[in-house]
Image (cartoon, helix red, strand yellow):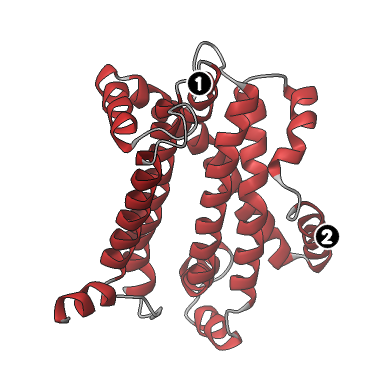
């Protein structure tokens, strides 16, 4: 009983138990023989497909290309979001403009813009990056603007009194104070863009002979290689979990927690 209690007090172990439970149910359903391998492959066949794709280098190539696309989009989206937010803090009129376009475009799914992306940029990297930037910029603007607005007047006055102004005031006072909001915006933007990337790749396909994980899933589905499809889905899920629980967790530890902005965390 003590061991079970310790397991369920630890967030990582709880998640591991749930995953093992889901996989067990999956294998039990497969073992009944009611579903064909093309519909519901066994865990063994999925694992074999995963190892083969990793060994051949195929999985690495497609994953690297997906990261290449999302890296470009994140860079563009972050620069645009911070630029628009900074201008909003300077000009009330521009702030109203940014609020209006954010209200219009933020609820709009990236997939809904696929026809426009095709007309404007054609099939290729530019269309995918356009969709990803749309998925990134709006939640980041909302959270960054809210964070900047939450900075107390006292903090701003203290910064001005020690000679800070302009960009130095923003970088030294406003950004650290608003960073919990900014970090939340980055998390939302990442998850939105990661989902949009896979969907866009499945529709736009490969560009210049290269394709990401979404394109790989489409190919394997077309050739009825269902275990390979699930292997790619496993990689997509694993990357999402690692980015959330390793990259962002470390970033939060080195910034928000280090600066004394305590955020309640689950064990």
Q: Residue at x 83, y 60 (%)?
A: 100
Place residue 37 in its image quadrant. Answer: top left
User: Which residue of the protein is positioned furthest toward the top in this rendering?
Assistant: 209
Q: Is residue 50 above or below residue 141?
A: above
* Quadrant of the frame with the N terminus: bottom left
User: Which residue of the protein is positioned furthest toward the bottom in this rendering?
Assistant: 154
Q: Is residue 216 above or below residue 147?
A: above
Closer-to-camera residue (130/266): 266
Closer-to-camera residue (71/190): 190
Place residue 261 in its image quadrant. Answer: bottom left
Instruction: Return the x and y of residue 84 as percentages of the image width and height.
Output: 69, 55
* Quadrant of the frame with the C terminus: bottom left
Q: Which residue is mark 1?
A: 211
Q: Which one is earlier in the sequence, the residue at label 1 or at label 2?
A: 2
The circle drawn on residue 91 is none
User: Which residue of the protein is positioned furthest toward the left in this rendering?
Assistant: 2
Q: CA distance from mark 1 to mark 2?
A: 36 Å
Disc 2 is placed on an element classified as helix
Neighbours of disc 1 within 10 Å: few (<14), some (14-19), many (20+): many
Q: Which residue is mark 2?
A: 100
Disc 1 is placed on an element classified as loop
Q: Is residue 50 above or below residue 153?
A: above
Closer-to-camera residue (227/147): 227
Q: Nearer the viewer, mark 1 or mark 2?
A: 1
């Amino acid at each position: 009983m003590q061991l079970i209690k310790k397991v369920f007090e630890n967030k990582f172990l709880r998640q591991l138990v749930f995953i093992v439970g889901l996989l067990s149910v999956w294998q039990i359903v497969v073992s009944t023989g009611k579903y064909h391998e093309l519909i519901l492959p066994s865990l063994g066949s999925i694992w074999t497909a995963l190892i083969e794709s990793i060994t051949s280098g195929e999985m690495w190539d497609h994953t690297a290309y997906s990261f290449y696309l999302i890296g470009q989009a994140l860079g563009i989206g972050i620069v645009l979001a911070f630029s628009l937010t900074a201008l909003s803090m300077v000009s009330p009129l521009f702030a109203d403009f940014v609020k209006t376009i954010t209200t219009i475009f933020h609820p709009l799914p990236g997939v809904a813009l696929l026809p426009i992306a095709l007309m404007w940029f054609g099939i290729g990297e530019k269309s995918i990056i356009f969709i990803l930037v749309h998925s990134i910029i709006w939640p980041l603007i909302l959270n960054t603007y809210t964070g900047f607005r939450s900075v107390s007047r006292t903090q701003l006055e203290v910064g001005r009194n020690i000679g800070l102004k302009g960009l130095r005031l923003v970088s030294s006072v406003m950004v650290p104070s608003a960073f919990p909001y900014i970090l939340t915006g980055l998390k939302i933007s990442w998850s939105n863009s990661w989902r949009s990337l896979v969907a866009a790749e499945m529709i736009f396909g490969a560009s210049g002979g290269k394709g990401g994980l979404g394109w790989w899933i489409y190919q394997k589905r077309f050739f009825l290689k269902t275990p390979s499809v699930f292997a790619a889905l496993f990689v997509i899920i694993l990357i999402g979990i690692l980015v959330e629980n390793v990259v962002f967790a470390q970033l939060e530890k080195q910034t928000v927690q280090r600066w004394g902005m305590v955020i309640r965390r689950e064990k």
